[in-house]
Amino acid sequence: MATLPQFKQRQIARRSTSDIDRLAKQYKANIDALTGQYQTAFTGYQAGVAEKMRPFEEQMATYKESLLPAYETQKAAYQKKLDEYTATLAELEKNPVIERTAKRQIPNPAYDPMGAPGPQFLEETYTEYIPRGIPKFTEKAPALPTAPVAPEVEKFDEGEFGTKRAAAESEFKREVGERKAARRGAVSRKITRPMLRGAE
């Protein structure tokens, strides 16, 4: 059977344990409330980011699905014409002139205006060389369309919630420490008093 001092010690221990349990429940409730606030704030932040990013995402979709394919088509057409022009220049380098047969009249050296009649001019066949003209390349390279730039999105500020969580945790540890210290002090006093009385 427990003596009176032992019974009181148990009562003190039970009260202290009950108090700590209450503090733990309160701490958990505070943390749950903070977590709910955090989730609400973060959901709002995500919605704001989505709204801010929507125009950029629409522009990027247009860029990828329309502007860029159109540019690639124009680029391929330009490259084809450039290749053809380059091939023409290479062919001109090999054959810079056109050769063709032509006829012309030249004075007849045997012609004697005072003598027997004869042709005054003779027809001569010769080869003429005509320089080939160098064509100009007038095509313009297509310009790469400017890609849309993503807007700057600020990071989610967790500072307020971190501060509140740390404060709640610090307060809980402090109060638990105070309860444990008070319990140890009370138990020590209950044990010491009977011993002092006995000494008297």
Image (cartoon, helix red, strand yellow):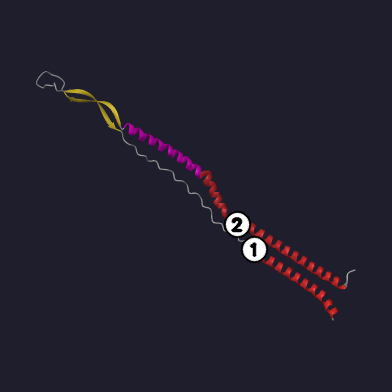
Judged left or right of residue 158, residue 73 is left
Q: Which of the 4 image quadrants contains residue 27?
A: bottom right
Q: Position of residue 192 (x, y in %)?
A: 81, 76
Q: Relative to 23, does residue 78 appear above or below in the rendering?
A: above
| Disc nearest the viewer among 2 and 1 | 1
Q: Which residue is mark 2?
A: 48
Foreground residue among 169 and 39? 169
Give the residues drawn in magenta, as a range: 67-95
Foreground residue among 46 and 21? 21
Q: Position of residue 152 (x, y in %)?
A: 54, 56
What residue is drawn where x is 85% and y is 78%? 198
What residue is drawn where x is 30% and y is 30%? 98
Foreground residue among 50 and 154? 154
Q: Tag 2, which secondary structure?
A: helix
Q: The disc labelled 1 sits on which kind of residue?
A: Gly
* Residue furthest to the top: 116
User: Which class describes the residues within 10 Å of circle 2: few (<14), some (14-19), or many (20+)?
Assistant: few
Q: Which of the 4 image quadrants contains residue 89?
A: top left
Which is the main secondary structure of the residues drawn in magenta?
helix
- Which image quarter is the C terminus in? bottom right
Foreground residue among 90 and 63? 90
Question: Is 48 within the magenta?
Answer: no
Q: Which residue is mark 1?
A: 162
Q: Tag 1, which secondary structure?
A: helix
Q: The disc labelled 2 sits on which kind of residue?
A: Gly
Question: Is 78 within the magenta?
Answer: yes
Q: Relative to 5, does residue 80 appear above or below in the rendering?
A: above
What residue is drawn where x is 54% and y is 48%? 60
Q: CA distance from mark 2 to mark 1?
A: 21 Å
Q: Relative to 25, does residue 64 appear above or below in the rendering?
A: above
